[in-house]
């Protein structure tokens, strides 16, 4: 009887962990798709209504995380990093000191936090991984990618948004021996470590690919796309990305229908790889070296891949079957997300475009200019409950895009 009770408790805890909502980088599945409805199909010339703004969140390029009750955003002030917590109307509730933050070049944090239940996970650009009480900002535990996990920082600082599943948090310190690790997300203790290919990390945030027989951890390093067994850390395969020698590989890989799509203008352009059914190998299907962008992401809709092109700067569509460009639009390169039938592109020149995708074609419906904020327009936008959130340096802007 006691064994049955223990087993029942274990099963209930396991189901609870798997069922928890994770608010994270680029939406629920890290694919830039936001499950929103009843949004505006066109904007006024000046843009949608500005609900509120927070104009003192410090330097940074991280996106906000919006939960049912709160908004969390990292920022840097006077060389110190903070997590700012707001209510949904933009009122500051608390800020937590995260220690020294990146100021060498492009000052400010790059990593977007993840929130699971009452816990918030955040990696500073200096490599300090924090677990905070999301209600109060109090630190539960922390570990250092460099001092504790023997990682090697990058020339632009760590840029990895935490990946969480169940009781684990997956991290890429990028050391020659401790290259990728899985930690217990409740206490930070090591579950496994992997040497992988021994590469330094490369500004990319990982994903998990769920297969019938195993779960595969997929991430970009400075010279490879790698696949690890998420249960053990075993290296299953690697794919070289050295055609254009560059260490900047920022876009999250996408897995769909047995294929991995890689938008990597910092290495191989746009690539489609077929993943073996057992998860142990990949085969290149096509590669378009001229297409793709460095850090703007992309969206897959049906048979097409939508996103910006780095050079020449424009918005374009690729065939998912062949990798060929099928359409292009005069709109400067930037980050792209999707909600309620439309694409939202935030260009690195500060323009926000509402784009209609139509079987591979693209039509610019509305656009407006972000005139407030500081430094580069690098942060990816976020949509939650009919509100479009855009971070431009020291300013967080909240726009009402609900259709009345």
Image (cartoon, rainbow, N blue to C red):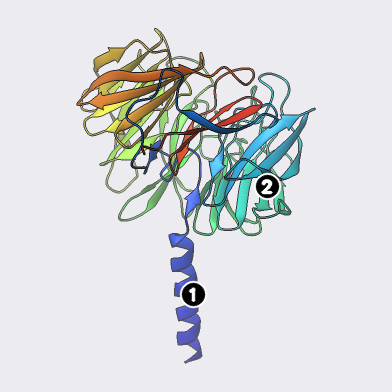
From what the image shows, is residue 387 above or below residue 353?
below
Specify whether 83 is left or right of 205: right
- Give the residue furthest to the front: 404
Residue hosting label 2: 130
Residue 125 vertical placement versus 85 (above, below):
above
Percent coordinates x, y for residue 374 in the rendering = 64, 19
Q: Is residue 265 in view from this perspective?
A: no
Q: How many labels does the image show?
A: 2
Q: Residue at position x 32%, y 20% from top?
A: 365
* Residue 276 or residue 207, whichever sits in front: 207
- In the current view of this chain or complex, which residue is farthest to the right? 78
User: Which badge, 1 or 2, is on the more N-terminal residue?
Assistant: 1
Looking at the image, can residue 129 be seen?
Answer: yes
The residue that appears at 43% across and 67% down in the rendered structure is: 15
Q: Relative to the observer, which residue lies in front, 311 or 242?
A: 311
Element carrying mark 2: strand
Of the pair 388 and 301, the residue shown nearer to us: 388
Q: Between marks 1 and 2, how big is the CA–CA gap? A: 27 Å
Q: Quadrant of residue 85?
A: top right
**346 and 312: which one is in front?**
346
Q: In which quarter of the image is residue 260?
A: top left
Above or below — where is 312 with respect to 104? above
Is residue 278 positioned above or below 360 on the image?
Answer: below
Residue 352 position, x and y percent, is 45, 21
Q: Is mark 1 on a helix, strand or loop?
A: helix
Percent x, y of residue 177: 61, 40
Residue 10, which numbered label?
A: 1
The C terminus - image quarter: top left
- Label 1 crowding class (10 Å Cα cut-off): few <14, some 14-19, many 20+? few
Q: Residue furthest bottom?
A: 1
């Amino acid at each position: 009887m006691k064994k049955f009770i223990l087993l029942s408790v274990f099963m209930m805890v396991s189901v609870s962990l798997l069922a928890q909502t994770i608010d994270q980088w680029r939406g629920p599945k890290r694919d830039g798709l936001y499950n929103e409805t009843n949004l505006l199909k066109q904007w006024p010339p000046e843009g949608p209504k500005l609900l509120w703004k927070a104009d003192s969140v410090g330097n940074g390029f991280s996106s906000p995380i919006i939960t049912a009750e709160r908004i969390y955003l990292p920022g840097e002030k006077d060389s110190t990093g903070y997590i700012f917590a707001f209510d949904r109307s933009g009122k500051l509730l608390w800020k937590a000191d995260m220690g020294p933050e990146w100021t060498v070049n492009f000052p400010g944090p790059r990593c977007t936090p993840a929130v699971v239940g009452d816990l918030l996970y955040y990696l500073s650009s200096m490599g300090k991984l924090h677990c905070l009480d999301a209600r109060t900002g109090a630190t539960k535990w922390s570990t250092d990618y460099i001092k504790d996990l023997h990682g090697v920082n990058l020339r632009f600082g760590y840029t990895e948004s935490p990946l969480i599943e169940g009781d684990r948090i997956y991290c890429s310190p990028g050391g020659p021996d401790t290259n990728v690790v899985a930690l217990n997300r409740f206490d930070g203790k090591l579950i496994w470590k992997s040497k992988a290919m021994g590469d330094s990390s490369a500004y990319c945030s990982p994903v998990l690919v769920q297969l019938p027989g195993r779960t595969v951890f997929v991430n970009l390093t400075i010279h490879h796309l790698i696949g690890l067994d998420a249960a053990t850390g075993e290296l299953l395969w690697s794919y070289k990305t050295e055609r254009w020698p560059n260490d900047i590989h920022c876009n999250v890989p996408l897995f769909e229908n047995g294929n991995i799509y890689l938008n990597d203008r910092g290495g191989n352009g746009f690539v489609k790889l077929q993943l073996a059914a057992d998860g142990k190998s990949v085969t290149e299907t096509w590669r378009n070296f001229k297409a793709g962008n460095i850090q703007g992401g992309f969206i897959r809709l049906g048979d097409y891949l939508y996103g910006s092109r780095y050079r020449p700067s424009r918005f374009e569509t690729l065939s998912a079957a062949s990798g060929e460009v099928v359409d292009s639009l005069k709109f400067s390169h930037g980050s792209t997300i999707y909600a309620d039938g439309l694409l939202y592109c935030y260009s690195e020149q500060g323009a926000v475009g509402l784009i209609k995708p139509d079987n591979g074609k693209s039509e610019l419906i509305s656009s407006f200019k972000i005139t407030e904020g500081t430094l580069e327009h690098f942060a990816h936008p976020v949509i939650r409950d009919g509100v479009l959130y855009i971070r431009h340096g020291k300013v967080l802007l909240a726009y009402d895009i609900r259709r009345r």
